[in-house]
Amino acid sequence: MTRVVIAPDKFKGSLTAVEAAEAIALGVRDALPDADIATCPVADGGEGTSEVLENAGGTVVQLPVRGPLAEQVEARYVLLDGTAYIESARACGIEFVTPSPEVALTAHTWGVGELLADALDRGARRLVLTVGGTASTDGGAGMLAALGAGVLDSSGAPVGLGGRALARVAQVDLAPARARLGEVPVAVATDVTNPLLGPNGAATIFGPQKGAGRDDVATLDAALRQWAMALVKTGARDVTTVPGAGAGGGIAGGAVAGLGANVESGFDLIASLTGVDAALEDADLVITGEGSLDEQSLSGKAPAGIAARAGQAGASLLILAGRIQLDAATLAGLGVVGSSALIDHAPSLDHARTHAAELLRARAEVLVREWATR
């Protein structure tokens, strides 16, 4: 009996990883009715992580929190085996805003701190913070303030929320936030390696996605530098040298400096909870994919992680994606023996997005039949 492991990430704007895995499984069953199929949807710590964790047996906790601007949003996190998995984007995600210079300068992470506080109130023994897809570039200052930290100007008054406000930071009181945390360990799950500052930093690389123009990027980068210097004065770790500190608009750096967090591979951490490693041990065929397969997918993203594991297991690898922007040589280097982009089989991008499930099923059937007859 053929053993098939299906391990996609989300198809952003169309399907969660769980929904994508279900659609692909239908196509595999169409091609190989007797196959032994294991669905193991995965994530890399970015958007969509909570659905994957819920699918792995986690309990969802929902609560209203302060969103990235003024209004409340309905957020959620997942509890699994005593660990709270806090997806930052659920509280301060870019989907809650329309990108603009003002948004880029004022969006904050206060709601993320509210989620962390709620998890602590519920007795979480460990906190895992996933940081992709935020609207903010505040270095995690809002998150720390929500946990009780003082982010203060030279007169001892709070500087306010948002990245721009950090230009006025003169002193930071981390003691209340650290007391709130107690001995609970914190991990930041990300595969982004961007530093906090500079040409590859949080403001420069991610700021424009949030609406920042050139001058706004310079303002935010300078403000983050001021924030990092103020943290160091408290005795906190200097996060300007920490790889990945720029993830989530610098929220990773704020967690490392303010909460003593460790940075871990988002994909490895989430994959360890989904059963994918055990499923791959005797796999004949592995199918993975995501909405857009491109150069970024090679840097710690879920498809690259699954490709590496499939190679180690000696299994054949197929990739399905909304669009594929990698050339044949690069795909071959990943060990891919067959691939298909949904956009190549749809009359428009909108059609591909709105009919992603049926297209995934159809393309999975075609690829699996081709693989089976080789």
Image (spheres, grey):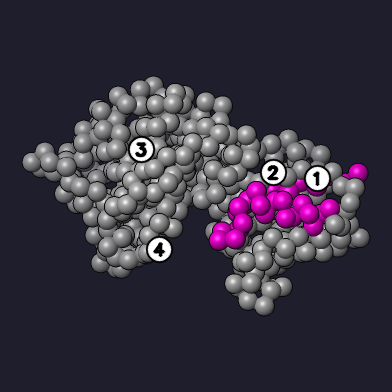
Q: From the image, state whether disc 1 or disc 3 is nearer to you.
A: 3
Indicate which disc residue 114 carries.
Answer: 3
- The kind of secondary structure element at disc 1 is strand
For disc 1, the marked residue is: 37
Q: From the image, state whether disc 3 or disc 4 is nearer to you.
A: 3
Mark 1 surroundings within 10 Å by alpha-carbon count, few (fewer than 14), some (14 through 19), many (20 or more) = many
- The kind of secondary structure element at disc 4 is helix
Q: CA distance from mark 1 to mark 2?
A: 10 Å
Q: Amino acid at mark 1?
A: Ile
- In the displayed structure image, the side of residue 191 where residue 1 appears, left or right: right
Q: Image quadrant of residue 146?
A: top left
240 and 217: which is toward the camera:
217
Residue 7 belongs to the span the image colors magenta: yes
Mark 3 surroundings within 10 Å by alpha-carbon count, few (fewer than 14), some (14 through 19), many (20 or more) = many
Q: Residue at x 28, y 43 (%)?
A: 141
Q: Which residue of the protein is positioned furthest toward the left in this rendering?
A: 155
The quarter of the picture where the N terminus appears is top right
Callout 2 touching callout 4 (CB < 8 Å): no
Instruction: Measuring from the top left, give residue 134's x and y in whole percent.
Output: 41, 52
For disc 4, the marked residue is: 209
Residue 28 belongs to the span the image colors magenta: yes
- In the displayed structure image, the side of residue 188 where residue 343 appears, left or right: right
From which residue to which does the magenta span run? 1-29
| Lower sequence index among marks 3 and 4 | 3
| Lower sequence index among marks 2 and 3 | 2
| Lower sequence index among marks 2 and 4 | 2
